[in-house]
Amino acid sequence: MALWSVRPLVFRPSSAPPRPGSPSAPPAEGPSGAAAADPGPGGRRRLRVRFLLQHAHGTGGTVRTVLNLAGRLARRHDVEIVSVVRRRAEPFFPISPDVTVRFAEDRRVPPPGRVARLLARLPSVLVPVDDASFRTVSLWTDVCLLRALRGPAPDVLIGTRPSLNLLAAELGGRGAVTIGQDHMNLPSYRPGLRREIARAYRRLTAVTVLTEASRDDYRAVLAGAPTRVVRIPNALPDLPGGPSPRTDRVILAAGRLTRQKGFDLLLRAYAPLAAERPDWTLRIFGAGPMRDALRETIAERGLAGRVQLRGRTRDLAGEMTRASVYVLPSRFEGMPMVVLEAMSKGLAVVAFDCPTGPGEMITSGRDGLVVPAEDVAALTAALRRVIEDAELRDRLGEGAAVTARRYALDRVGAEWDRLLDDLSAVRRPARVDGVRPRRPGAARPAALTARRRPRTSAPDPAGAPGPPDATRR
């Protein structure tokens, strides 16, 4: 079934200033973000860079990575983040004071008025049903986001998840540099979303991926398109505190408590070790929908006291200095930021060779141990090795700290500097508004007319999100 089932809405830019507190004038943090055309350091052009992020005040590796990159790019450019939603007053991760943050929909207060409340009960038409964020947004979210994007377009527009990359492809237009970041990996997405990615990402200037495997996947699905596919890994900022001395008998794991993160597999793998080595403790940090199920498993397997669910922490770096081993039991990843952080702290890392990331980040036996994906027995054996062999732990931890230096923020940030310089040099500055009405007589984008119309002999791909009647020029 195609995605689009409601008639397109038309949002027209307004020359009147937005009312204070309205979705078109969401609160800002940091500098004003005024356009600046003066050259940056070294005479290079200063660009207006806009990130589209789901929740700038949220948690998780993608949020942290984007905030780190935005702060680094703000040294040379005018950087703003447009956050789709806001659920809390303060950010979970620090945000550079040089980065402007604007919020489209403020979830801390109910939608204003009867019409807004009605729209909040209707499904989004910008987000594909196969995108993981579909159930968390609404038609009111769409309205708020499109209002937030009205006005002068940036020189560079960067999406940070599939739904926002698809929106960037619609909004970019001739002359604008549009970049879609993939913080996961292509095979992990549902088939309908993969088809939409293959169709719509061809309109992006570039797609950035985290691993060589992802670069190969995207080059295959975008073969023949002008879209550049570039591998730039996650950047590792300086973390507070020193390295772990690896003297505490603690194994650490962290992440959202979801099926993807594989903590159910970890409990199965650790159960025999808890009986063999009761002097060791497994600490799991994070929150999520599987918390109750994990609690039940801990009780059923007699792991109380040996396994601790510690909830969220703002001081994961400090917790790492009080651990000796880090374990990643994920079923799939992009390039797990938390593994880089653990390596930088000198922990001995044990990880499943899940798609994607661990197999490229870790050289097994040199700076960590990698075992076959979802092989619980192999994970048990690898953890047993690092528990019982202090010399191995030290060797792996020291090797991990050396490897982590390759991902330093300044080093990875320089790769982004080169990419933006390269892409902006061959693109004319964008002169279109962020959201413009369709020109008279111009065809609507196929994505905006395909929703639930009768199929012909050739099935329609999953509908493409984009602003209703947003014109690409």
Image: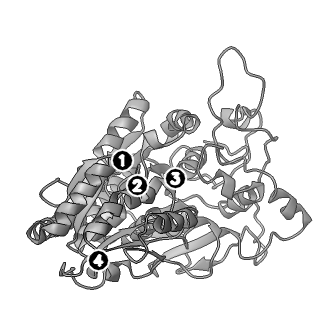
Along the line of sight, the residue nearer the viewer: 399 or 308: 308
Residue that label 2 marks: 265
Residue that label 4 marks: 238
Among numbered discs 2 and 3, the one appearing first in the sequence = 3
Residue 431 vs 19, above or below: the answer is above
The residue positioned 71% from the left and 76% from the top of the image is 108
Badge 3 density bin: few <14, some 14–19, many ≥20, Cα 10 Å: many
Residue that label 1 marks: 374
Image quadrant containing the C terminus: top right
Discs 1, 2 touching: Cβ within 8 Å: yes
Among numbered discs 3 and 1, the one appearing first in the sequence = 3
For numbered disc 4, what is the local secondary structure?
loop
Discs 1, 4 touching: Cβ within 8 Å: no
- Left or right placement of residue 120 versus residue 40 in this view: right
For numbered disc 2, what is the local secondary structure?
helix
Q: Distance between the residues labelled 3 and 4?
A: 25 Å
Give the residue type that dot 2 points to: Leu
